[in-house]
Amino acid sequence: MSNIVKRKSRQLKRKPFGFILIILAWSLVMGWLFAWATSVYSATPTSEVGTVDVVPAQYQLGQDLYIENCATCHIAIPPAVLPTQTWKNLLEDSQHYGVQLKPLVDPPRILVWRYLSTFSRTHLKDEETPYRVNKSRFFNALHPKVKLQRPVQIDSCVSCHPSAEEFNFRRLASE
């Protein structure tokens, strides 16, 4: 009878150890998989990315069309600075901040919309739709603790982001 009791007590002691080993192995495998999955983005050097986020190939043409159509008159700002609803309204309206524009037609409009809607942020139901960068809560969230020397305007991005005209918001001024 004592042999049976000893065997059961050994089996009980081994089960928690085996369970811990399984959890450890699972954690290592999952960590390795997550590291491998995220290494796709690190394959592109940060200095070459330019924009805030890496833009997958399926949205690249939309980004190029956005920059081609918007950056001819002013600095093209990253979509994340304004909510999706603002971008939607801007694409649908031919009146653009007091200037009559020739509206984009399909398919370029669809490509630009897919890019902007994918990389912009959601709009809160009770929130007023901002049409100026300085009124956007996203701009403020993307610039925490930044003391701005003058009021925010589309052309003032260059004071902190010297490569903003090339749609590179990663490079910052030394100040």
Image: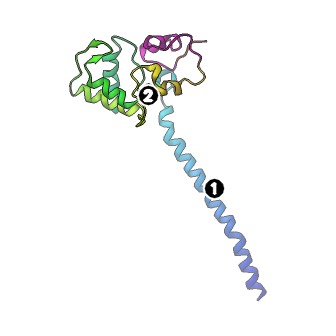
Q: Which residues are magenta?
A: 147-170
Residue 157 is one of the magenta-drawn residues:
yes
Residue 8 is one of the magenta-drawn residues:
no
- What residue sits right under mark 2 in the picture? 80
Q: Residue 99 in the image: x percent, y percent?
A: 28, 12
Q: Main secondary structure of the magenta part?
A: loop
Up the image or down, 55 lies above or below 148; here it is below
Q: Tell which residue pokes out farthest to the bottom in this image.
A: 1
**Disc ID at residue 24:** 1
**Residue closer to the observer: 45 or 72:** 72
Q: Could you tell which of marks 2 and 1 lies nearer the N-terminus?
A: 1
Q: Residue 74 in the image: x percent, y percent?
A: 37, 12
Residue at horizontal 55 percent and vertical 50 percent from the top: 30
Q: Residue 105 in the image: x percent, y percent?
A: 21, 24
Residue 50 visible:
no
Q: Quadrant of residue 113?
A: top left
Secondary structure, mark 2, is helix
Residue 66 visible:
yes
Left or right of 175, for residue 77:
left
Q: Residues within 10 Å of mark 1 (few under 14, many from 20)?
A: few
Residue at horizontal 46 percent and vertical 22 percent from the top: 135
Q: Quadrant of residue 63?
A: top left
Q: Residues within 10 Å of mark 2 (few under 14, many from 20)?
A: some
Three-letter amino acid code at disc 2? Ala
